[in-house]
Amino acid sequence: MTSRFSGWSLLLGGLSGQRRWREQWRAAAPKRGYDAIIVGGGGHGLGAAYYLAKQHGIRDVAVLEKGWIGGGNTGRNTTIIRSNYLFAESSALYDHAIRLWETLSQELNYNVMYSPRGVLMLAHNVHDVQVAQRHIHANHANGVDNEWLSPRQAQEFCPPLNISGSLRYPVLGGALQRRGGTARHDAVAWGYARAASALGVDIIENCEVTGLQRDANGAICGVATTRGTIECGRVGVSAAGHSSVVLQMADVRLPLESFPLQALVSEPVKPIMPCVVMSNTIHAYVSQSDKGELVIGASTDAYTSYTQRGALHVNLHTLEAICELFPAFRRLRMLRNWGGIVDVTPDRSPIIAKTPVPGLYVNCGWGTGGFKATPGAGHLLAWTMAHDAPHTLNAAFTIERFRDGTLIDEAAAAAVNH
Amino acid sequence: MLVIPCPYCGPRPELEFSYGGQAHVLRPAAATNPDPAGWNAFQYERANTRGLHAERWRHVHGCARFFNVIRDTTTDEVLRSYRSGEK
Ligand SMILES: Cc1cc2nc3c(=O)[nH]c(=O)nc-3n(C[C@H](O)[C@H](O)[C@H](O)COP(=O)(O)OP(=O)(O)OC[C@H]3O[C@@H](n4cnc5c(N)ncnc54)[C@H](O)[C@@H]3O)c2cc1C
Ligand SMILES: [Zn+2]
C-alpha cells in the first residue's frame, strides 16, 4: 500500500535520504476479465479509471497502456489550462475541468502543481481585437472569467513582452483569463494512477490493444491485446492520436485525423516569464516551467502522421515569432524538441460519447488542446460508461453531431491556428 | 521536412507544396443520393491510415497542379507520386 503524503512524510523522507519511498502504484498483470476496461493510459484514461472506482463504485477496472503511462500526449504537451472558449457547450465543458483542477492535488493527495498564473491571448490587428472582445462577452455570459488588457496593462502583467509599435504585428491588447495557467503533466498521470491503483484499479503497461471482440449481438465482450485476451462488456477508448485506429477494430469510423504537434524547451533560466502568453495571429505560445525552461509550443505539421516527430521548419516559424515578441529570449539556446500525435475533429471540439457498438465508449478528438480538460474528460468518460448515457456536460459532444449538422465550431477559439 | 516528388517538376522541398488531405474521396452524386450518412462520410470521415496513405498535394509554389502521393504515415517515407486520374 502506498502511504499518504503529508508535510511529515516529506520531512521523514528527506531525513532518511529519500530512500524509503515505495512504488506509487501496483504493476499489475492482466486478469481473465474486468467489469470495465480503459484503452490508453494517458491522463484522460487514468482519470476515467479513478472516477469509475471513486464515484461509481466500479473498481474491477483495468487501464491498458501500450507503452508507459503518461508517455503519450500527456507527457508531451505544453500544459496550458484555460476555459475561455466561445460556445456555451465548450465553456461549460472546459470550466468543469478547471473547477476540478482547483482541488485536484487535495483530491488525489498528490501535487499536480496546478498554477493559475493567468493565460494572456494577444491581439495584433483589428480582427483579433474584435474576436477577443466577442470571446470576452460570450465568456461573461457563460460565467467564465476573461478580461481585456491594453498593451500597457499587458506589459505590466507580463514584463518581458514587447509592445513597441514598430513590430511587424504590434500588440494591440490581449484577453486575460486569470484562472488559466499550467500544471505538471507527469504528476497528473502519476497522481491518477496512484489514486486509482489504491482503489483497486489494475494499471497494465506494455499492453497494446490489438482487437475489439464482439458477441453474437454485436456488443463488446472483450479485447485482444499483446498480453492475451481479456473479457469485458464495457470498454472506453481514450487513445488520443490512435483513437481512430482502435475504433476501426470495431468498424466504427470517426471524423478524426491525426497530426504531429511539436513542442520545445529552452535551457533553464531564473524566473522571467510570470504567465502564459499565446498569439494566434503570429503563432506563438510560451510559459516557463518550475525547472526554469521556457516551454514553447509549435504548430501541427501539414500532413497526417503517426511518427511522433515533426519538421524543423515548423519550430523555426514559432521561434521567429517568440523572438519578436520577447526580444530578451533571443539569446536562449533550445535544449530539446519532440512531437506528439494529436487527433483533430473537423470542428475542433472533442467527442465523449457512446458509439454505435453497445458497450463501447470513446473519449477523443481533443486535438491540440486536451490537457486542460484532463480531470473533466476522465470524469465524463467514467460517467458515460457507468450510466450508459452521457452527462449533461458532454451530451452535445457526440459522433453524430457531424451527420446532424450540430457542430460546436471552436476552430477560431483554439487560440493558436492549428 | 519532406522531399516531395512532383510528377511534373521533380523532387522539391515540402515548403513549395500545400497538403490536400486523403486522396480518392468520392463525392456522392447530389441529385440522386441525398443520404445523410453518405454526405457525412464524404465530408468528415477519413481513413486516418496508420501505414500506406494515398494523399493529395498541390505544388502551389511551382506548377500549381494537384497530384497524389503514397506516404507511409508510420515513417513519413514518401514512396511515390502519380498524376490525378492515374493509379
Ligand atoms: C506538443 C503538444 C503540445 C500540447 N499542448 C497542449 C496545451 O498546452 N494545453 C492543452 O490543453 N493540451 C495540449 N496538447 C494536447 C494534449 O496533450 C492532449 O489533448 C491530451 O494529452 C490528450 O490526453 P490523453 O490522455 O487522451 O492522451 P495520451 O496521453 O496521448 O494518452 C493516450 C494513450 O493511449 C495509448 N494507446 C494508443 N493506442 C493504444 C492501444 N492500441 N492500446 C493501448 N494503449 C494505446 C498511448 O500510448 C497513450 O499513452 C498538446 C499536445 C502536444 C502533442
Ligand atoms: Zn510541380
Image: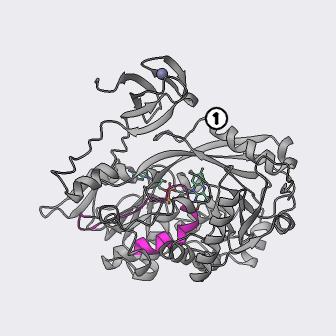
Q: Is residue B29 left or right of residue B23?
A: left
Q: Is residue A365 magenta?
A: yes
Residue at 53%, 65% in the rendered image: A25
Q: Is residue A7 magenta?
A: no
Front residue of this view, candidates A391 and A28: A391
Can you give x and y, in whole percent of width and height, for residue A213 in the image? 23, 56
Q: Is residue A268 left or right of residue B57?
A: right
Quadrant of the drawing holding the N terminus of chain B: top right
Can you give x and y, in whole percent of width and height, for residue B57 in the image? 44, 32
Mark 1 CB lies closer than 8 A to ligand 1: no
Residues drawn in magenta = A356-382
User: From this viewpoint, is residue A336 visible?
Assistant: yes
Residue at 53%, 71% in the rendered image: A375
Q: Quadrant of residue A182?
A: bottom right
Front residue of this view, candidates A125 and B20: A125
Residue at 57%, 76% in the rendered image: A95
Q: Is residue A291 left or right of residue A232?
A: right
Q: Secondary structure at mark 1?
A: helix
Chain of the residue that carries numbered disc 1 in the rendered image:
A
Can you give x and y, in whole percent of width and height, for residue A322 in the image? 76, 48
* Tally of numbered tags: 1
Can you give x and y, in whole percent of width and height, for residue B2 in the image? 53, 28
Front residue of this view, candidates A86 and A225: A86
Quadrant of the drawing holding the C terminus of chain B: top left
User: From this viewpoint, is residue A227 visible?
Assistant: no
Q: Please give the residue where the numbered disc 1 appears in the rendered image.
A: A312
Residue at 63%, 39% in the rendered image: A314
Above-or-below relation of B9 to A227: above
Label 1 Cα crowd, 10 Å radius (few <14 / some 14-19 / many 20+): few
Q: Amino acid at mark 1?
A: Leu
- The chosen color scheme is one colour
